[in-house]
């Protein structure tokens, strides 16, 4: 049998990789969204939030007497790079990236909720409390993206119809 603490450790390592993926993905996106200043500011802000979340996860792992997985973190970073590059040649990259970011936020939300439940079951209320901070930040970001997705789409379509540059420099 696997103890809930062991599962929690594995999931925390996954979460560190997930946050590394988020940072990598957002860092690539900020290079290409200058025509969408609200998104640019929020993406830069969320890079810093994601870095803090990765630090929190690392702190939780240390509290459990272990550390991150360099293999999982490396794979997460590669996946973030691959995802951010997948839309580079699409004329509607900004809309696709916004939709993906919104979906990714919900992926993170689900993971944090599962980890909080695991931490509670494993008798680690302080870890659950720390993870709740990250969950709250992800819920805020998902709500922000949800509110702006219609406007990003409308701006993209208006710029495209007017023949303006729809994406930022490459």
Image (cartoon, rainbow, N blue to C red):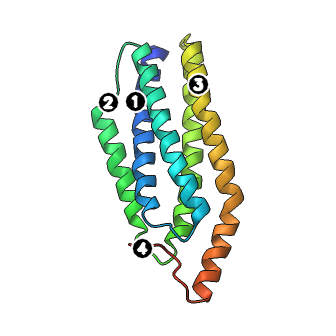
In percent of the image, x 45 and y 40: which residue is there? Answer: 19
> What is the distance, in whole Å, between disc 3 and disc 2 at their CAs?
20 Å
Left or right: residue 138 compared with residue 88: right
> What is the distance, in whole Å, between disc 4 and disc 1 at their CAs?
35 Å
> What is the distance, in whole Å, between disc 2 and disc 4 at their CAs?
35 Å
**Which residue does the numbered mark 4 point to in the structure image?**
169
Are circles 3 and 4 on residues that touch, CB within 8 Å? Answer: no
> What is the distance, in whole Å, between disc 3 and disc 1 at their CAs?
14 Å
26 to 140, vertically: above or below: below
**Which residue does the numbered mark 2 point to in the structure image?**
69
Q: Residues within 10 Å of mark 4 (few under 14, many from 20)?
A: few
> What is the distance, in whole Å, between disc 3 and disc 4 at their CAs?
40 Å
Q: Work out whether mark 1 precedes mark 2 in sequence or the reverse, and give the earlier one.
A: 1
**Which residue does the numbered mark 1 point to in the structure image?**
13
Q: Secondary structure at mark 1?
A: helix
Q: Which mark is nearer the camera, 3 or 4? A: 4
Could you tell me residue 43's position as x and y percent? Answer: 53, 53
**Which residue does the numbered mark 3 point to in the structure image?**
116
Could you tell me residue 95's position as x and y percent? Answer: 57, 68
In percent of the image, x 36 and y 44: which residue is there? Answer: 76
Q: Which mark is nearer the camera, 2 or 4? A: 4
> What is the distance, in whole Å, between disc 1 and disc 2 at their CAs?
6 Å
Q: Work out whether mark 3 precedes mark 4 in sequence or the reverse, and give the earlier one.
A: 3
**Residue situated in front as seen by the camera: 115 or 133:** 133
Are circles 4 and 1 on residues that touch, CB within 8 Å? Answer: no
Are circles 1 and 2 on residues that touch, CB within 8 Å? Answer: yes
Q: Work out whether mark 3 precedes mark 1 in sequence or the reverse, and give the earlier one.
A: 1
Q: Which mark is nearer the camera, 4 or 1? A: 4
Are circles 2 and 4 on residues that touch, CB within 8 Å? Answer: no
Q: Work out whether mark 3 precedes mark 2 in sequence or the reverse, and give the earlier one.
A: 2
Q: Locate residue 55: give its quadrant.
A: top left
Which corner quadrant holds the N terminus?
Answer: top left
């Amino acid at each position: 049998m696997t103890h809930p603490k062991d599962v929690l450790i594995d999931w925390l390592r996954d979460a560190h990789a997930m946050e590394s993926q988020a940072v990598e993905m957002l860092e690539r996106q900020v290079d290409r969204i200058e025509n969408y200043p609200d998104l640019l500011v929020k993406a830069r802000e969320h890079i810093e939030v994601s870095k803090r979340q990765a630090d929190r996860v690392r702190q939780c792992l240390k509290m459990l007497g272990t550390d991150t997985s360099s293999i999982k973190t490396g794979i997460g970073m590669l996946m973030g790079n691959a995802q951010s590059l997948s839309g580079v040649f699409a004329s509607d990259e900004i809309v696709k990236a916004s939709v993906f970011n919104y979906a990714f936020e919900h992926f993170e939300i689900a993971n944090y909720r599962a980890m909080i439940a695991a931490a509670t079951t494993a008798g680690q209320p302080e870890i659950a409390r720390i993870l709740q901070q990250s969950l709250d930040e992800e819920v805020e970001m998902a709500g922000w993206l949800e509110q702006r997705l219609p406007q990003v789409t409308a701006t993209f379509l208006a710029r495209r119809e007017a023949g303006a540059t729809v994406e930022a420099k490459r």
